[in-house]
């Protein structure tokens, strides 16, 4: 019984990190929110890892994992993007409704709701992923955790001294909308994306591409710290697309 519960515990830890990240993102503690998401992704990796090595994979675990990912890798980046739209100067609207003794007052930024297309795209991807029964050594489309890390790292990236000059370009409704559209697109494309698993001696490219990504990641983390996640995710996508184009 305890052995079967170990993967579920890691999944719930992922969900807890996602809930914490939502609060932190709403409070504009973006650095802490990114750390929470990174912890969530860490737990997300190990729930599947332990489920496989303990041979306790289950339909319940699959569904629970997707529900946790929906928060950590779906809703959290949507919240961060909403906040970025607000920071970019998107116009807010005060809403007031009163009927007899009932009143409702709140402020909303209509344009910022575009950010919540990310959790919609994540939900579609996760639901489709749950229907896949074929075991393969690659991902179809960019995994939701990778997209989440990219979006949640954006506030750190634009505040980094090396990129502060392009902050004004990124923090515009048009650029943020493009980023949202590309995020949804890359999550749901059918191209084969690099997975850090399924290495084969007969196919050296399954080792070469992840190794290139690892080396670039180490260098970028050394130079940029957590802001390097932006460069790393972009590199991951470019290498994956190159792999598709070359057919290797």
Image (cartoon, helix red, strand yellow):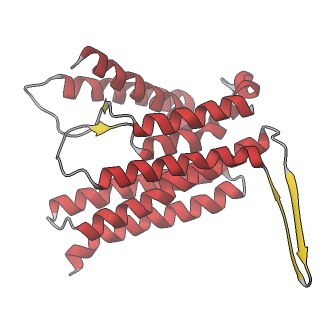
Q: Which of 191 and 145 is in front in this view?
A: 191
Q: Nearer the viewer, residue 103 or 191?
A: 103
Q: Is residue 69 above or below residue 203?
A: below
Q: In which quarter of the image is the C terminus?
A: top left
Question: x, y (%) of residue 22?
Answer: 61, 59
Residue at the spot 23% in from the left edge and 18% down from the top edge = 247
Q: Quadrant of the N terminus?
A: bottom left
Question: x, y (%) of residue 174?
Answer: 71, 29
Residue 158 lies left or right of residue 104; in this view the side is left
Residue 209 lies left or right of residue 119; in this view the side is left
Residue at the spot 20% in from the left edge and 74% down from the top edge = 3
Q: Nearer the viewer, residue 112 or 22?
A: 112
Residue at the spot 31% in from the left edge and 38% down from the top edge = 140
Going by the picture, which residue comes out furthest to the bottom? 101
Residue 100 lies left or right of residue 47; in this view the side is right
Question: x, y (%) of residue 55?
Answer: 14, 64
Residue at the spot 40% in from the left edge and 48% down from the top edge = 125
> Does residue 31 appear in the picture of this structure?
no
Going by the picture, which residue comes out furthest to the left? 202
* Label tally: 0
Q: In this view, does 22 lie above or below 179?
A: below
> Does residue 11 appear in the picture of this structure?
yes
Question: x, y (%) of residue 42?
Answer: 39, 53
């Amino acid at each position: 019984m305890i052995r079967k519960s170990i993967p579920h515990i890691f999944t719930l830890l992922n969900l807890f990190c996602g809930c914490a990240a939502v609060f932190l993102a709403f409070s504009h503690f973006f650095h802490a929110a990114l750390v929470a998401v990174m912890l969530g992704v860490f737990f997300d990796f190990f729930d599947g890892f332990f489920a496989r090595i303990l041979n306790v994979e289950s339909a319940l675990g699959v569904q629970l994992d997707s529900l946790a990912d929906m928060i950590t890798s779906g809703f959290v980046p949507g919240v961060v993007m909403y906040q970025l739209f607000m920071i970019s100067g998107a116009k807010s609207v005060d809403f007031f409704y009163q009927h007899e003794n009932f009143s409702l007052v709140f402020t909303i930024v209509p344009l910022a709701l575009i950010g919540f297309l990310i959790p919609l795209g994540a939900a579609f991807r996760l639901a489709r992923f749950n229907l896949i029964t074929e075991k393969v050594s690659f991902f179809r489309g960019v995994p939701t955790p990778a997209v989440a890390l990219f979006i949640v790292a954006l506030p750190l990236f634009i505040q980094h001294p090396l990129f502060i000059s392009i902050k004004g370009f990124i923090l515009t409704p048009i650029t943020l909308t493009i980023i949202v559209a590309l995020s949804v697109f890359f999550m749901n494309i059918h191209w084969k994306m690099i997975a850090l698993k399924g290495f084969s001696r007969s196919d050296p490219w399954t080792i070469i591409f992840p190794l290139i990504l690892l080396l670039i990641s180490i260098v970028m983390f050394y130079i940029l710290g957590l802001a390097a996640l932006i460069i790393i995710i972009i590199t991951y996508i470019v290498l994956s697309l190159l792999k598709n184009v070359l057919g290797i």
